[in-house]
Amino acid sequence: MVISTPSPIGSFPVESTTKSISSIQNQQQQDMNTTSAVDSLRSRTTNSTNPVSARRRTASAPAKSSSLCRSNSLSRDIGHAATETYLITRLAFTLLRYLGVGRRWISRLLALGLYAMLLMPGFLQVLYQYFFSSQIRRSIVYGDQPRNRYKGWGSLLGFQLAERDIIVTCLDYRNFPQGTISDMVDDVSRGISFVCNNISNYGGDPDRIYLMGQSAGAHISSCILLKQAIAESKGECTSWNVSQIKAYFGLSGGYNLTNLVDHFDRRGLYRSIFLSIMEGDESLQQFSPEILIEDPSASNAIPLLPHMVLFHGTEDFSIPPDASINFVDALKRVGARAELILYDGKTHTDLFIQDSLRGGKEELFDYLVEYIHSGDPEALANDATASPRKRLCPEPLIKLAGLVSPF
């Protein structure tokens, strides 16, 4: 299962928080309501009680009723998507008032628009599948704050993982200026807790979860993982356990905010705005896992952490690869299990967007699937004979998008 989140507006660009559950059990017969569900991209099962296959065997009247329910559900999803689009647009204009409309930001916005247009053939296919697939639960509420839902932000990678029998959930959370870093951490932590306590209702194994974040999502999820481990080491009561997370995958993340303030300022995320997002200069260390991990007060939490695997492209200019290199070094110094994988020539969005649109064989995807399915000979055998991933966008458009990308 994979949970993905959008970027905090004005913070790290194009990020996601992702969580995976590799064990696919039979789907339960009852249809869960939207307050107790996960927005999951469910893999096909052979269970005869699967609601999808059961509907195909019903009489014509129930089939019409089921079709009407799906139609009503789709209408609600589209309505909610329109509301979310309006909200994001309004927040974007609010952010622009913070940033000021200078030449640098105008050029970046134009580049972003062109980047999205070039990749639109692939995005439209993913969007269609997201809204019309019967295997997806959309807009599932996991908390009482705005945007506390499971959304389609990570659908691109999610659909591809679901084809390999991995349940995927995609997590949304409050972004700046709707919320600051504490709100983001609280929302994502609440979402992880929801998954850990409810995923068994959807055929997932709550003791085989893989947490993954990209860019700001990598930063936020690593903060949560360390915070949770520290709380457990002190004997505090928690709603989920670090032991449920079998591995952490951090993709293109930043883990020491004190080292990134000046870098972001040079790239247009000005110091004053960044410090507003991070709740002031005094909070930078508090939300820097690389610093916290070496604090003596965290020593008892180190053995509780799962295997930490960090991925980074060597041509990432949004967040330099040194961010992952230094965090892995810090993890190893304190005795944590950590691994670094660098991808030569890859940018901030190559691994998560462009490479997924290319389809076929790809190092990151193959690594994730093999890692999650390790110890499962049947799943590995199926992976070996699986069809190559479908190409979603022509190569010339992908290459042009890489050239104009503002990231």
Image (cartoon, rainbow, N blue to C red):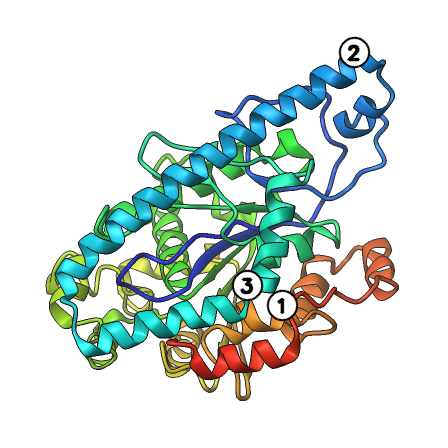
Q: Are marks 3 and 1 in contact (CB under 8 Å)?
A: no
> Three-letter amino acid code at disc 3?
Met
Where residue 275 appears, x then y in whole percent? 15, 64
Q: Residues within 10 Å of mark 3 (few under 14, many from 20)?
A: some
Q: Quadrant of residue 10?
A: bottom left
Please state if 288 lies on the left or on the right of 373 as rendered. Answer: left
Measure the C-alpha gap from mark 2 to mark 3: 39 Å
**Which of the marked residues, 2 or 1, is nearer the chain's N terminus?**
2
**Which of the marked residues, 3 or 1, is nearer the chain's N terminus?**
3
Residue that numbered label 2 is attached to: 61
Q: Quadrant of residue 123?
A: bottom right
Q: Quadrant of residue 28?
A: top right
Label 3 residue SS: helix
Foreground mark, 3 or 1?
Answer: 3
Label 1 residue SS: helix
Please state if 125 lies on the left or on the right of 16 as rendered. Answer: right
Foreground mark, 2 or 1?
Answer: 2
**Which of the marked residues, 2 or 3, is nearer the chain's N terminus?**
2
Q: Answer whether residue 209 is visible to the viewer in this image.
A: no
Residue that numbered label 3 is attached to: 120
Vertical side of 351 occupied by 88: above or below: above
What is the number of the mark on residue 357? 1
Q: Are marks 2 and 1 in contact (CB under 8 Å)?
A: no
Vertical side of 112 occupied by 170: above or below: above
Where residue 129 appears, x then y in whole percent? 65, 47
Image quarter in which the C terminus is found: bottom left
Instruction: Look at 44% across and 52% down and name the residue there.
Output: 5
> Three-letter amino acid code at disc 2?
Ala
Q: Answer whether residue 332 is visible to the viewer in this image.
A: yes
